[in-house]
Amino acid sequence: MRRANLLRCTVSAAVVGAVAFGFAGAAAAQDGPTTVDDIIVTAQKREQSLQDVPIVVTSLSQEVLQDAGVKDIKDLTILTPGMTVTSTTTEASTTARIRGVGTVGDNPGLESSVGVVVDGVYRSRNGVGFGDLGEMARIEVLKGPQGTLFGKNTSAGVINIITEAPSFTPSWNLEATAGNYDAWGLSGSVTGPITDEIAMRLYAARRERNGFYDVDVGAGPRTLTDDANQEFYTLRGQLLFLPNDAASIRVIADYTRRTEYCCAAVQVRTGPTYPFIDGAATGTGQRPPAPGNGALPFSRQAFSNRDTGQEIIDRGISAEANIDVDWFGGSTLTSVTSFRDWSTTNGMDLDFTSADIAYRNQDGEFRSSLDSLTQEFRLAGANDRLDWLVGVFANRENVTRRDSFYFGAAYAPVLSYQLSASLNAATAGAIPISPSIIPCFTRTAQTTLGLQQCLGTGGAIMGGGPSFAAGQSLRDNYAQASESVALFTNNTFHLTDAFDITVGLRYTYDSKRLDSLQTNVGTNGLTCAAGLANQGAIVGAVGATNAPAILGRLCLPWSNPFYANRARSEEVNDSEVSGTVKASYRLNDSIMVYASYARGYKSFGFNMDRVQSGVTPNASLYFPSEIADSYEAGIKTTLFDRTVLLNATYFDQTFSDFQLNTFLGTAFVVESIPELTARGVDADFMWFTPIEGLSFAGGVTYTDAKYGKFTAADLFNPANFNQLSLLPGNRSSFAPEWSGTASINFDREIGGGLRAGFALSAKYMTEYNTGSDLLPFKMQDAFTTVNGRISIGAADDRWTLDLWGQNLTDEDYVQVAFNGFLQGSAFNGPLNTAPGPYQGSYYNPSLDSQTYAAFLGQPRTYGFTLRFKH
C-alpha cells in the first residue's frame, strides 16, 4: 500500500515526501496552502493539521519561504515573531533564541537551547544549521520546551526543517541570482526515477558576495579591505527506495564548504583608551570617540589589521526507513540513522582595531570540530481512541577545540598605557601615562621604593624586568566525548470525539568526558610570574585597592604561567526525566482550546576555554544541566469557511540553572544563572482572502523575560558575580517586549500565459539588550525590517523572474554588542549604592572606561533571480 500511494502521488517531490515520511501534505505543494485545513505539520512526529496540534507552531510553506528570501535559519527570523538568530565572530557561532531564551554559541562545549532538526536529524549546534538549506518543502518553528519527541537539548524550542524529497516524476530546475555587493549565485536540481523502485534528487548551489564592512587595515599584514563576504558551495544528493508496498527508505548525503572573511566588528562606543589604541596604530586605530565618550552614530567602518578568514566544512549522511508492520493491530516502524562531520578553522583580530594588539592565525591551531553518530527507532500506531508512539534515541558525539593566541607588537605598550593611566588618576597625576611601566612591576626582587621611583619616571629607571613580547603565547587542546541514550513515548488518548489528553515522557542518560591540555608557548608567562613574586612591593607602592587589578592584567589567561602543561580530565554522568501533559477540547469544528505542561532538559557540559578566578585557573570546567518548566493555555480558531486562522497562547516558562555564556572583554565565562522566567502571549493570524492568490499572515509575541534575584553565593562560581551583577531581577538579553511579523503574498495568472505576484514581509521588535551582561551601551533601539519581491513568469512556472530586496528600508541595527578586547573596563567596584537602575550592581556609568564593539545586521540588499523549471 505504501508503494502504491507513493507512485500515485508523485506530482511533485514534496508530495512524495509527504506520503513517504509524513512530511507535508498540501502545505508543501508548489503553490502553497489555499485554506487553513491545508496546513499540515509533523510537530508530534505524525502528520496532523496545524489546528489540531496543542503546541505553538509557526508553519512556513515553500512558497512563503521563497517569497521572503529565506536561505538559512537567520533569514527565518523575519517570518517568526519571538525569534532572533544572531552570529558573532564566525558564522559557525550562530545562536537561535525563542521567547528571549537561547545559548550564545561561541563555545563548542555549549549545546543550544533551540534545537535544529533537518529531515529528522538533530543538529546539536545552531551553527551547523546556518548555510544554504537547499530546496525546502516547509519549516516549522515549535516554541517552548520540546523535550519529549525532539530530544534533550530543545528546552526553548525547535526549528524543524523539511526539505524536498526525490520524485518519480522527472523534473529539473535552475536558478540564477545577481545583486548588489557584487552578489551572484547559481543553484539547480534534478529529480526522477532511476528504476521503478528508486528515485533520485540532486541539488547544487554556489554563492558569492562582497562584504558589508569597509576595513581600515592599518599597517597590516591584512590586505583585504572588506569583510563579511560570502563564498560557499553546497551539494546534496538523495535516493528514495521503494522495495515493496510496505517500506520506503530515504538516503541523504550533503556537503557544504564556506571560505569567507567573517566577522569584523565596529566600535559603537569608543572609550577613553582611544589615545592608546590610536597611538599604537598606523593611521587611525579605531573610530574616534564621540563627545563625552558617548554612543557613536551607526557606521560600517571597521578596523582590523589581522585576517578574519573562516573555513567551515559541514557534511553528513542520513537514512530514514519506514516499514509498515502488523504489530499491535498495525503500526509503522521508523529508523533514522545519521553521521555528521563539521569543522571550522578561523582567523581572528581579537581587538578589532588596526593596532597590532592580539590575534589568532588561520593556521589550523584555532579550530573546532564535531562528529556525531545518531540512531533513532520509533514505533507508532493508532486506533479510534489512541495515537501511540514509543522510541529510543542514541547519540555518540566527539567535540574538539584547538586554541591559539598571539601577542601583537602593540600589546605591551597598550596595556602599559592603561595601567599607568589608571594609576595617574589614582595619584592625581604623580605617575605619568607611559607605554613602558610593565618592567617596573616585574624587575627581580623589586622593592616598594624602587617601584615607586620607576613608576614616577614612567619606567625610565629601576625597571628592567620582563615584559610581553610579540608572538604566540598558548596552544591548547580540548577533546570532549559524549554519549546519550533516551527512551521516550508520546500518546494521545481520544477520550471523546472532542476531548484529547496527550502524555509524553522521556528518560535521558548523558555521559561526557573532557580531556584537555593547556600549554604556554614562549616566555610571556614570565611577566606574570615576576609580577606575582613582587606582589608585596606592588601592594606597598600602589595600595591594596589597585594591586589586584594590576596583577590581574599581568596574569590574564594567555599570559598565566599556571597553565603551563596543565592536563585535565573530567567525566560526568547525569540523567533526567522530561515530558509533557496536554489537554485539548474542541468546542466545535472551528474552535479548540488547550492547556499543557512540559519539561525540557539541556545537557550539562564543559567550558572549552581558559577560565580563572583572579589568577588561579578553575579546578573544574564543568557547568550543570539546564531545566525548563513550561505551562501554556491557548485557543486555536478556524473561521470564515476555513479561510482564517486566529490562534493565541499564554505561556509561563521557568529555566533553572540557565547556561549563560558571556564575554567579559578578555575571556568568555559560562555561568549557571539560578532562574530565568519568560511569560507572555503568542498570537498568529492567517487569511486566505476571496481574491484568488492573495493571502495575509502575521503574528505577535509579548514576552516578559527576566532573571530571578540572586547573589554571588547563588552562582556556581561566586567570583563571576561582579560582572553579572546587572542581571538579577532585570530583563534578559535578546528579549524584546514586543515582536511582530506581517506578510502579504499575491500570486495568480494574469492572462497571455503569464503569472504575476508580489510579496512583502516585515518584522518589528521593541528595544532589547544585545549583551549577555546587560551593559547599557549594548541596547538596540526598536526597529523594523522589510523584505519584498515582485515576480513575473510563465503560467506553468517554466520560467519566473523575481525582483527582490531584503531590509528594503536599510534599517541600521546591531546583532550583538560586546566589550572591546583590552580596551577599558565597565565593571569597576565598589558596589553601586546610588539610587537608580544600577543600584546593587558593580556598574557605575561615571567609571565606565570600556570601548564597545558590535557585529551588525545586514544592510539593504537587492537584485534579481531568474528561475527555470521543467
Image: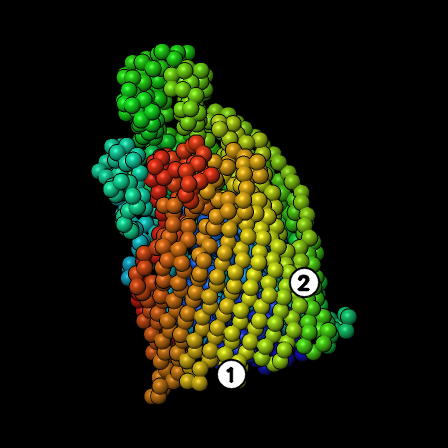
Amino acid type for the residue under numbered disc 2: Val
Q: Position of residue 722 (x, y in %)?
A: 47, 36
Q: Is residue 17 above or below residue 125?
A: below
Quickly name the residue at label 2.
581
Residue 780 visible within the image:
yes
> Amino acid under label 1?
Phe
Local secondary structure at mark 2: strand
Taking depth in this image into account, of 459 and 16 the one nearest to the observer is: 459
Q: Position of residue 71 (x, y in %)?
A: 43, 63
Residue nearest the observer in this picture, 596 or 361: 596
Q: Position of residue 34 (x, y in %)?
A: 49, 80
Residue beneath the point at 65% across and 73% down: 585
Residue 42 in the figure: left or right of residue 726: right
Q: Which residue is mark 1?
A: 640
Q: Label 2: few (<14), some or many (≥20) within 10 Å?
A: some
In this rendering, the answer to whether 30 lies above or below 296 is: below
Mark 2 or mark 1, earlier in chain: 2
Determine the CA span between mark 2 and mark 1. Answer: 31 Å
